[in-house]
């Protein structure tokens, strides 16, 4: 498979010791622990559990004590799929899992595009969607990191394509069960699947009932989807109980309970970031909104005045280059990371097929629900709006369909070039980030202190397998630091270091004397290490 070969080739440029985010690092740390112990149980272990039985200072922040193990598992199927690959070929081979997911997402996009355009252009739209989703959309970035987004998107987009067959008149039971099973498996990977499943299935049933006037088909589609969903969901629950994984249902209920009017202003801000931000820093939303406006102008004016359309895309590309000239970083906004999603969003047409209108409805109607229930605080440190990646991919497919339908070669090339440029930026960012993180953790592992006490709760989760290469404690509060020093002393050690984002260091810290300080910049963030002797 040529697409998978492209992913593999690019992945070798990345470091295997640095990742797109802290969730990936925690998964890699778990894989490493599973393989080292020769076990399928996702137990991270904890060197100081005798002195800290509640895991207050466990290095992998937010780990849970389950039976006799220490677990930080958000998606058990991802770990089970990656474990044998990690055992044989380490992190690089385990990337076959997200790469397979990305290839699946590209094929799902192809299947959807073929049903979202008239039959005479089905092949052209299908293969164009395959390659653009696979290589020039946020899916390509998530193919290069051991995260569950690419497989999750593959399942959800495929479910839309499958239910599209029911809307086209196919027998509802078998296809709805298949769609439900796809959504059920996606739900074991991604929490936002519950929102998308509600809209995907609910909208299909509503369209069957109102437009097609197929009452029986609507009922059977709903029941079949629920039955199909239950199978992988319950199977995953059984695996969690058998292997000691964290309760996936608890994570879902936690996301649901976090929604509320008391956080409305913050949710609106994060929704704006998820749509438009061109970088995590303040002001990124305004620049991203300008980029989106330029793409809209290119679509609107390309037929009226091609020079204006081409000029708008050139200005958009120049603006993006000007932004990254200040340093590579995340592009959190989905419409900025995927310019063709902008086309899919604004290029509504009466000529759209019923399946295209259905996909559009799923993409747009899901967004406010995702924003309402998504975990707060995760909007900026991500690529292309990872919570809304399914909507993004659906809109990219519809954008490709629009461009294919209009037959405008110049518009196609301009949008393809801009999309490729942004995705290339993402690959370059991951290259830079992975090497910097890997290099810094290698330095920390070689430090002479017995223990490193980390004040940033998520830091050790960045290190992946470095978790097992030295002794860490994560102490977020000042009181936690006092407990950490006690643990170091009671363990028989006489030195430790604190790692913080603050340059300030006390000459004496709970009886320990400061020996010196160093600082390093990693992925645009300063970290300070202060060495102490007891």
Image: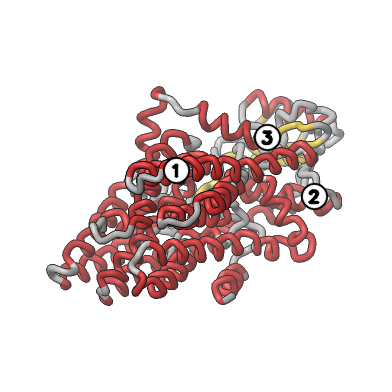
How crowded pointer 3 is (Cα within 10 Å; few <14, some 14-19, many 20+) is rated as some
Residue closest to the eye, 255 or 154: 154
* Residue 167, position as x, y percentages in the image: 41, 53
Mark closer to the chain start, 1 or 2: 2
Any part of residue 402 in sight: yes
Other-residue count near label 2 (Cα within 10 Å), few / some / many at <14 / 14–19 / ≥20: many
Position of 313 with respect to 64 (left or right) is left
Tell me the residue that label 2 is attached to.
34
Relative vertical location of residue 159 with respect to residue 198 in this rendering, above or below: below
What distance separates the C-alpha of mark 1 from that of mark 2?
Answer: 45 Å
Residue 424 appears in the figure:
no
Residue picked out by circle 1:
218
Residue in view at x 65 percent, y 38 percent: 454
Counting residues from the N terminus, which is met first, the one under dot 2 or under dot 3? 2
To which quarter of the image does residue 88 belong? bottom right
Residue identifier under label 3: 247
| Callout 1–callout 2 Cβ contact below 8 Å | no
Mark in front: 2 vs 3 = 3
Query: In the image, 340: left or right of 98?
Result: left
Quarter of the image for the C terminus: give it. Answer: top right
Quadrant position of residue 239: top right
Label 2, label 3: how far apart the Cα atoms are: 19 Å
Q: Position of residue 215 (x, y in %)?
A: 42, 41
As helix, strand or loop, the secondary structure at mark 1 comes to helix
Q: Secondary structure at mark 3?
A: loop
Q: Position of residue 126 (x, y in %)?
A: 42, 69
């Amino acid at each position: 498979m040529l697409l998978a070969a492209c992913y593999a080739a690019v992945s070798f440029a990345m470091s295997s010791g640095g990742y797109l985010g802290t969730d990936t690092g925690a998964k890699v740390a778990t894989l490493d622990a599973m393989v080292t112990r020769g076990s399928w149980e996702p137990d991270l272990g904890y060197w100081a559990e005798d002195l800290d039985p509640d895991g207050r200072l466990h290095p992998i922040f937010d780990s849970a004590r389950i039976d006799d193990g220490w677990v930080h598992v958000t998606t058990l199927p991802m770990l089970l799929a990656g474990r044998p690959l990690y055992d044989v070929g380490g992190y690089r081979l385990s990337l076959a899992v997200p790469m397979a997911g990305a290839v699946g997402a590209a094929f799902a996009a192809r299947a959807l595009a073929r049903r979202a355009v008239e039959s005479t252009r089905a092949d052209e739209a299908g293969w164009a969607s395959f390659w653009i989703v696979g290589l020039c959309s946020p899916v390509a970035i998530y193919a290069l990191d051991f995260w569950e987004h690419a497989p999750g998107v593959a399942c959800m987009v495929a479910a839309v394509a499958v239910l599209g067959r029911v809307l086209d008149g196919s027998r509802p039971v078998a296809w709805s069960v298949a769609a439900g099973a796809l959504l059920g498996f996606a739900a074991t990977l991604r929490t936002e699947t519950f929102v998308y499943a509600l809209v995907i299935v609910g909208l299909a049933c509503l369209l069957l009932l109102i437009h097609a006037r197929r009452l029986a088909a609507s009922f059977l589609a709903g029941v079949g989807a629920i039955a199909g969903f239950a199978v992988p969901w319950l199977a995953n629950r059984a695996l969690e109980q058998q292997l000691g994984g964290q309760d996936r249902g608890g994570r879902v209920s936690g996301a649901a309970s976090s929604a509320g009017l008391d956080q409305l202003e913050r949710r609106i801000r994060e929704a704006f970031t998820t749509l438009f931000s061109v970088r995590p820093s303040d002001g990124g939303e305004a620049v991203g909104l300008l980029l989106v406006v330029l793409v809209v102008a290119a679509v609107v004016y390309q037929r009226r005045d091609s020079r204006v359309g081409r000029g708008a895309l050139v200005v958009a590309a120049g603006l993006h280059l000007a932004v990254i000239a200040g340093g590579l970083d995340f592009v959190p906004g989905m419409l900025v990371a995927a310019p063709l999603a902008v086309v899919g969003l604004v290029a509504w047409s009466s000529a759209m097929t019923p399946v295209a209108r259905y996909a559009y409805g799923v993409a747009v109607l899901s967004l406010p629900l995702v924003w309402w229930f998504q975990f707060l605080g995760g909007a900026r440190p991500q690529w292309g709006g990872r919570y809304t990646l399914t909507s993004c991919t659906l809109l990219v497919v519809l954008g490709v369909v629009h461009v294919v339908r209009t037959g405008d070669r110049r518009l196609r090339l301009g949008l393809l070039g801009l999309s490729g440029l942004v995705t290339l930026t993402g690959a370059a960012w991951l290259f830079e980030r992975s090497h910097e993180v890997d290099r810094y953790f290698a330095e920390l592992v070689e430090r002479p202190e017995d223990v490193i006490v980390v004040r940033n709760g998520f830091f050790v989760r960045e290190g992946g397998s470095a978790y097992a290469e030295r002794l860490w404690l994560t102490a977020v509060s000042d009181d936690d630091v006092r407990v950490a020093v006690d643990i170091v002393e009671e363990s028989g050690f006489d030195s430790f270091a604190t790692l913080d984002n603050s340059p300030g260091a006390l000459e004496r810290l709970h009886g320990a004397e400061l020996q010196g300080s160093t600082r390093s910049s990693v992925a645009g963030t300063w970290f300070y290490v202060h060495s102490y002797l007891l």
